Image (tube, grey):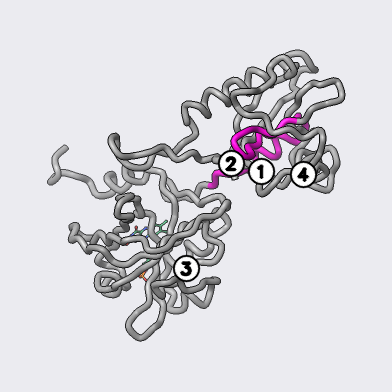
Amino acid sequence: MTASTIDTMEFRKALGSFVTGVTVVATTQEDGTPRGFTANSFSSVSLTPPLVSVCIGKVASSYPVFSDTSHFSVSVLAEHQKNVSGVFASKSPDKFAQVDWHKGVTGSPIMDGAAAWFDCETYQVIEAGDHIILLGKVVNFSTSSASPLGYCRGGYLTFSLSQDALAAASSARVGAILESHGGIVMLEGPDKVFHLPTGTKLDPASAPDSLRGVLSKLKIDAQLDFLFAVFEDAEAKAGAVHVYYRGQVIGDLPQDSAVRVVPLDAIPWAQVQDEAVSAMLRRYVKERREDAFGVYVGDANTGSVQPLAKSA
Ligand SMILES: Cc1cc2nc3c(=O)[nH]c(=O)nc-3n(C[C@H](O)[C@H](O)[C@H](O)COP(=O)(O)O)c2cc1C
């Protein structure tokens, strides 16, 4: 297939296989009123200087504003902000009246509750076919622990706990591998056996036998990021499923004699008596060392791997 024979619909479909986040790109117009649109073409560009890019279609009604602006912001939407994406992808004349936002140092509007945001001065505007590439030099940014919203093949994706996973976990052993200050949280029993925090289901925190209930009783404030392992219990009754999430402790751990933070290279394997849990933890340590959970930022020479589940 050559450029001249490219089927636009098929091309769009192929591009849609690339999983992205969802952002709102916003600025203030000369009269001080805010302007913004939903974009998934956001990308990191350079670390030094700190540059990001976003592409704007020339047919967008806000194109003349963004092609000429001296500053703009990019808010990376959190998974509960599908409605914000919808508002800014629309032609609504009062988009900013429908969401909560505040101004950044450049004066650009930033979405409240975003997973991250970047406040930028315009660095360069590059002609690119039916779009322009807006390069921004980041002058301020912020990140939060909120799970980001994803987008692929025309639909939204969420990366945290899905309802299906919760349903599947309703009659299982549900545990967590939680990172805190470079180690993982384990509970030491009176018999000196080390366990991971577990419950018989995930929610609610008010149920003492749920994972969230167990964590709440231990006063561990944790964020469960991703499903890490699902396996059947070979020894116990058939169909007993173990579901383990990985996540991180928010803030400090309580001074509880049973709660230990075990460095990844010093897990007391002899005291982890459950073989399946031990095998799962060995995989976790290996993947953590290899940064297999990481997202690559940069290029082969200057890039670095940013761990997704970095401890707080
Ligand atoms: C998930 C999603 C991603 C989008 N990404 C872009 C993008 O990267 N660039 C763009 O110009 N339009 C993008 N759009 C379309 C614009 O948000 C849409 O055309 C919007 O109406 C433009 O606002 P405006 O008419 O006020 O300029 C996207 C829409 C959605 C739903």
Tag 4–tag 3 contact (CB < 8 Å) = no
Residue type, numbered disc 4 = Pro
Residue type, numbered disc 3 = Ile
Q: CA distance from mark 2 to mark 4?
A: 16 Å
In depth, the one of 205 and 241 nearer the eye is 205
Label 4, secondary structure: give it: loop
Q: CA distance from mark 3 to mark 2?
A: 26 Å
Q: Which residue is mark 4?
A: 254
Q: Quick check: can you spot residue 175?
A: no
Which residue corresponds to the image point at 29% horizontal and 72% vertical from the top-left? 70
Q: Which mark is residue 311?
A: 2
User: Mark 1, residues whose alpha carbon is within 10 Å: few (<14), some, or many (≥20)?
Assistant: many
Residue 147 appears at what percent x and percent y? 56, 50
Label 1, secondary structure: give it: strand
Tag 2–tag 1 contact (CB < 8 Å) = yes
Tag 3–tag 2 contact (CB < 8 Å) = no
Residue type, numbered disc 2 = Ser
Residue type, numbered disc 1 = Val
In front of the other: label 3 or label 1? 1
Q: CA distance from mark 3 to mark 1?
A: 27 Å
Q: Earlier in the sequence, mark 4 or mark 1?
A: 1
Ligand 1 in which quarter: bottom left
The part of the chain drawn in magenta is 158-186
Q: Earlier in the sequence, mark 2 or mark 1?
A: 1
User: Mark 3, residues whose alpha carbon is within 10 Å: few (<14), some, or many (≥20)?
Assistant: many
